[in-house]
Amino acid sequence: MLGGDPLAEKRAAKKKPVTFAECVAAYADAKLGEFRSDKHRKQWLSALERLAMPALGDMPVQSIGTQDVLRMLAPHWRERTVTAKKLRGQVEAVLTWATVSGHRKGDNPAAWRGNLKELLPSPGKVAKAVHHPAIAPGAMAAWWADLAKRDGMAAKALQFLALTAARSGEVRGMTWDEVDACASANAANPANTDWSWTIPASRMKNGREHRVPLTAEAIAILESLPRMEGSPYVFFAPRGGMLSDMSISAVMRRMQEAEVKAGRPGYLDPRSKRPAVPHGLRSTFRQWTAERGYPRDMAEIALAHWIGSEVERTYQRSDMFERRRAMMVDWCALLRGEKVNCDNVVKLGAAG
């Protein structure tokens, strides 16, 4: 039949049910500004595409019920609990958007309270804590001396990571415009060690800007680095892009392999006996701060962790920057194998 009724076709299109996959795409476009980067957006979509789409993608959002969400989540809830927990929240957000946008009615079948909470075990009961293998604080000096013998950009990045207790991604993504270099030395600071590194909120796991005090050792590393024209990165890859996470991990792996080849146990986690990894250095730092008696909040701020409740964070706006600088100087002394004067430790409640 030639021709047709355009109005009838338009009405039919309007009545066509919207699928979950279509809602995911629309939700991602609508919330694009909330993602820290294009990489974060792709990561957000990845779990949905791999785990939710096969079960829910072609379903009209109006017809998705609690049992549908449960069937999608159940295979992953015990084996990959953290991922499944995040996935549930993502599906809930998409379905909430679908409801507000007029594509579905009724309660959210992915809601936790009063819904899936009654059908699935609590994530805290089934999740297996992942502890990254760490080096004992007392073994850090030997590890540091070994690392200092190694050349290459990845080795320098690992040194900087250890000195700042930062995450791998924060160091690898570091750009020169994030570094605030003191222009010159002065009488109060002849060593010229007032440099700092400010990581923008867009690159932080908690979504908040983070200032890192840089010690003389960290500054020396920065001053020793070459710069590649056209690349903004401090620790750049051979072609000018960002170093891969594997490149830093490979440095530690090669250090461990060399130790084993020499007939020594190497740099093992005291509890798990597994070879230490870069992220485990943050655990080593946290253990050291606890043993040294540094205030808990100050150590947690150094690691860019959330501290206290939302109300407490509203009123506690200080990032204890200068006190943290003194703490990091002591941490560097540990790496060099030097003894630290216990009187230098800032006790809880001290002024500053």
Image: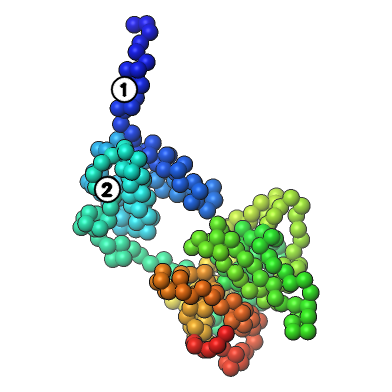
- Which residue appears at 70% of the width and 60% of the height? 176
Horizontally, residue 197 falls left or right of residue 2, namely: right
Question: Which quadrant of the view contains residue 196?
Answer: bottom right
Residue 286: % across, % down: 50, 77
Q: Amino acid at mark 2?
A: Asn
Residue 200: % across, % down: 59, 61
Name above or below for residue 239 compared with residue 331: above
Name above or below for residue 57 compared with residue 168: above
* Badge 1 or badge 2: first in the primary sequence: 1
Of 229 and 194, which appears nearest the observer? 194
Residue 350: % across, % down: 53, 89
Name above or below for residue 25 compared with residue 266: above
Give the crowd class for mark 2: few <14, some 14-19, many >=20 residues within 10 Å: many
Mark carried by residue 12: 1
Name above or below for residue 243 compared with residue 323: above
Circle 2: element type: loop
Question: Which quadrant of the view contains residue 224?
Answer: bottom right
Give the crowd class for mark 1: few <14, some 14-19, many >=20 residues within 10 Å: few
Q: Quadrant of the C terminus?
A: bottom right
Q: Quadrant of the N terminus?
A: top left
Residue 215: % across, % down: 67, 76
Question: Which quadrant of the view contains residue 191?
Answer: bottom right
- Which residue appears at 75% of the width and 77% of the height? 192
Mark carried by residue 108: 2
- Which residue appears at 58% of the width and 93% of the height? 343
Q: Amino acid at mark 1?
A: Ala
Q: Residue furthest top?
A: 2
The residues bearing labels 1 and 2 have C-alpha atoms spaced at a distance of: 27 Å
